[in-house]
Amino acid sequence: MTPQLQQAIKLLQLSNLELAEYVEEQLEQNPFLERNDAPPDAPVERRGEKTPEDAPARTGDGAEGGGELNLGDSAEAREARDSLDADYEDIDPGASRSDAAAEDYGTNDWSSVRSGGGFDGDERAFDATLSKEISLADHLTEQLHMATRDATRLFIGSYLIDLIDEAGYLREPLDTIADRLGADLSEVENTHALITGFDPCGVGARHLKECLKLQLIEADRYDPAMQAFIDNIELLAKGDLKGLVKATQADEEDVRDMIAEVRALTPKPGYAYGGGTVQTVEPDVFVRQAPDGGWKVELNNDTLPRVLVNQHYYAEIANASSEEEDKVYVSEQFANANWLAKSLDQRARTILKVASEIVRQQDGFFAYGVKHLRPLNLKAVADAIEMHESTVSRVTSNKYLASPRGLFELKYFFTAAIGSSTGGEAHSAEAVRCRIRELIDAETKDTVLSDDKIVEILQGEGVDIARRTVAKYRETLNIPSSVQRRRALLQTAI
């Protein structure tokens, strides 16, 4: 593997923040690289229609966003291009074929699915999502994957974790999150409850009272008096000891003990994993609803470093160099500058192609919510866009997609699959779980469904599933057996 190819692969797996830092280093080290501060060109046209005025604009010579080559046709430029050890096909074996089919890759859109409507379309509002240099999110994500294998909970849980701020709080209402994801509120609440049991204790709380409550429950100190104390915690801030005595119906000595206990708690548990700089997560691509009801995928130009290669300076230095060592250095630096610009361009192309295919495959989710996630794996995307699975894997890590439903890492959209009993399209595990919940939620005391009956119904709907799988999914949803459900319904009726 050539050094240039190693660099291209490295660039592909960097986040946009890491890429910006890397390009800054190269700008300092390479005399032939310049930052392009000029405003982007006019919006890209596609299929005879102009993109919206606010769409990311074309920033390259026939290429979107990744880098700008301004080399002309001089002999030095041709020689530099010929000296490169690798080409597009070395990075992406299918690039020459797939790119030819979509010369204008600045935007991609489909009209196959119409949106369910009712969602805020301002994707840039999600810029407020925070991440940490020393990641609390990574710590919570590891616990999430240990706590559940349920794909729906993993998806919702990953989204909730991304919304938890550096102090460890989840500031957004759960019903708002459920609406945005198109998920049942109960599923979001159950997933939130799972996360609040993670380390550090108190993480995921929506406010100070809940944070303290979680820590007191963990310490087995949340008795009725302490509950009343926490419910009136603002009296502590006011120094109103008599008010706390009255609220808790405890004597002054007990209240002073409770004060000491509460002051020993951690009001901002997330800070145990931080101290690093808080950075805004910028999406790499935007998914916007098209006028025809489909989806348009656009690169976020604000996160794409834009560089120029100064061929005139190269020609001047090359002609002035007499020593062989100097000539070799100049030639190598010029070739490296060209390769960096080319690699940035290819990185932008690859991210857009992968993101566009994910949106095409998961358009049901963007239109209707988490219940409509389709089964998807790396191979399916790689085959569709003629890339290697390892390339898709690199692209989907640390790359974010902003849509009306929220800000998601691209890897979120790869889900497990369940086969079709009719030989047709497979069903996602999330969708099957949601269907099981729907069937059980519709039960009455006279129509309680056994696992065997649920299997029969699902197979009638084209889902090839075994009884033990239904039982496993039912258990992961915390749904009792049919016997327990029937007993509960009978008691309710009485």
Image (tube, rainbow, N blue to C red):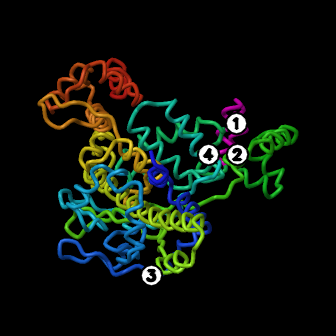
Say whether residue 111 is left or right of residue 168. Answer: left
Q: Which residue is mark 4?
A: 136
Quadrant location of the C terminus?
A: top left
Q: Which range of residues does the magenta coloring cover?
A: 209-228
Residue 439, given in percent of the width and then of the height, sits at 25, 33
Q: Nearer the viewer, mark 1 or mark 2?
A: 1
Residue at mark 1 to residue at mark 2: CA–CA distance = 10 Å
User: Regarding mark 2 in the picture, which secondary structure is present there?
Assistant: helix
- Give whichever of discs 4 and 2 has the lower sequence position: 4
Type of residue at label 4? Answer: Leu
Magenta segment includes 377: no
Q: What amino acid is labelled 3 in the image?
A: Pro
Residue 437, given in percent of the width and then of the height, sits at 31, 34
Question: Disc 3 and disc 4: Cα gap in Å?
Answer: 37 Å
Mark pair 3, 2: CA separation: 54 Å
- Dot 3 crowding, Cα within 10 Å, few <14, some 14–19, many 20+: few
Q: Write the residue at 21% across / 35% down.
A: 426
Check contact, mark 1 vs mark 2: CB within 8 A.
yes
Dot in front, 1 or 4: 4
Which part of the image, by quadrant, shows the N terminus?
top left
Which sits earlier in the primary sequence, circle 1 or circle 4? 4
Give the farthest residue toward the right.
253
Secondary-structure class at tag 4: helix
The residue singled out by tag 2 in the image is: 230
**Type of amino acid at the residue the image marks with label 2:** Ile
* C-alpha span from label 3 to label 1: 55 Å
Q: CA distance from mark 1 to mark 4?
A: 22 Å
User: Which tag, 3 or 2, sits closer to the chain's start?
Assistant: 3
